[in-house]
Amino acid sequence: MVSYDSWANLADQFVDEAYASVKGFVRTFVLHHHLLEHLPPPPASVLDVGGGAGHQSFPLAQAGYDVTLLDPSQAMLNKAERRLQQLPTDAQHRVKLLQADGESADEAVDGQRFAAVLCHGVLGYLENPEVLVNQLCLCAAANGLISIMTGNAKAMAVRPALERRWDDALASFDARAEVGVLGVPGRADTVDELSELLKSQGVEPLRWYGVWLFVDWLEFSGAELDPNDSKQVSMTAAVELEASRRDPYRQLSRVFHLVGRKNIS
Ligand SMILES: C[S@@+](CC[C@H](N)C(=O)[O-])C[C@H]1O[C@@H](n2cnc3c(N)ncnc32)[C@H](O)[C@@H]1O
């Protein structure tokens, strides 16, 4: 059972501030479009591990998917519950909230197998991602999708350089950890290593993407992006989606999104 809620102090900052920004909008938009390229048509079951306030999986519930959101943090689940009340009633009925650590996901879902298992923005907070990745792969049905978003260890110098912290930038090229934008230490992975880890669990990597790029460059170099300028925001999101799919842009994104499919046997 979950005891200490380490996300209690971060919930407001993450849900009410980060997601209210242009970058937050781009994150949801881009990941949602990537997922729709691979998901089976609804209805199908989706498990969102470390799902937080549901920014990634509630849009899937609205699109007709049956969502189980699992998170250890009561503070984040409270935010999810509040956001859930804003959804249309039929979508609300397609969402189940569960309190548990991702490391015991299989037990928490009573052995259910899902058409897709999401884990976005969670691995970076764990010292070792292996146990959680094992659980993600275990909870996917045969032919099911695994969707992981996490920090890109190949792009660690981007943020300090854009903030003109040149000493930090020089020291970051081979770094694996940094204090992230929420002010807590985070770890980064590489696409290659995470792909190997998935393969060892019977999951074939299908495609990887960047998540956002130009909004980081603008924000870290001091530009103000107005989340209420809907025309600018939707054009920004369209450009970011295109960049997320292509080299060399995706390689410089500070975050990557890896999608894999579980082997049939
Ligand atoms: C940055 S938030 C991401 C939330 C959501 N996935 C999203 O993309 O909006 C990180 C989430 O991971 C959750 N978390 C932290 N440790 C976890 C663990 N061991 N297993 C599952 N979730 C965890 C936190 O409670 C928090 O809700």
Image: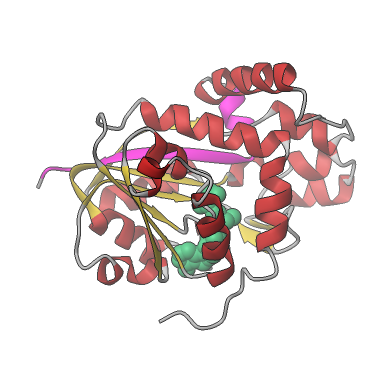
Specify start and end residues of the magenta stretch as a single range. 249-264
- What residue is drawn where x is 58% and y is 76%? 5
Whether residue 133 is in magenta: the answer is: no
Please identify the quadrant where the N terminus is shown: bottom left
- What residue is drawn where x is 20% and y is 59%? 112
Task: Judge from the rendering whether residue 260 lies leftward or rightward of residue 99; answer left or right.
Answer: left
Quadrant of the rendered image containing residue 203: top left
Task: Judge from the rendering whether residue 143 lies leftward or rightward of residue 18; answer left or right.
Answer: left
Between residue 215 and residue 161, name the one nearer to us: 215
- What residue is drawn where x is 54% and y is 54%? 53
Residue farthest along the front direction in this orientation: 89
Quadrant of the rendered image containing residue 130: bottom left
Between residue 78 and residue 236, name the one nearer to us: 78
Q: Could you say where residue 57 lies in the image, as x and y percent from the top left?
A: 44, 44
- What residue is drawn where x is 42% and y is 70%? 101
Residue 201 showing in the rendered view:
no
Q: Is residue 150 above or below residue 77?
A: above
Between residue 197 and residue 132, name the one nearer to us: 132
Between residue 227 and residue 195, name the one nearer to us: 227
Task: Judge from the rendering whether residue 100 lies leftward or rightward of residue 162; answer left or right.
Answer: left
Quadrant of the rendered image containing residue 206: top left
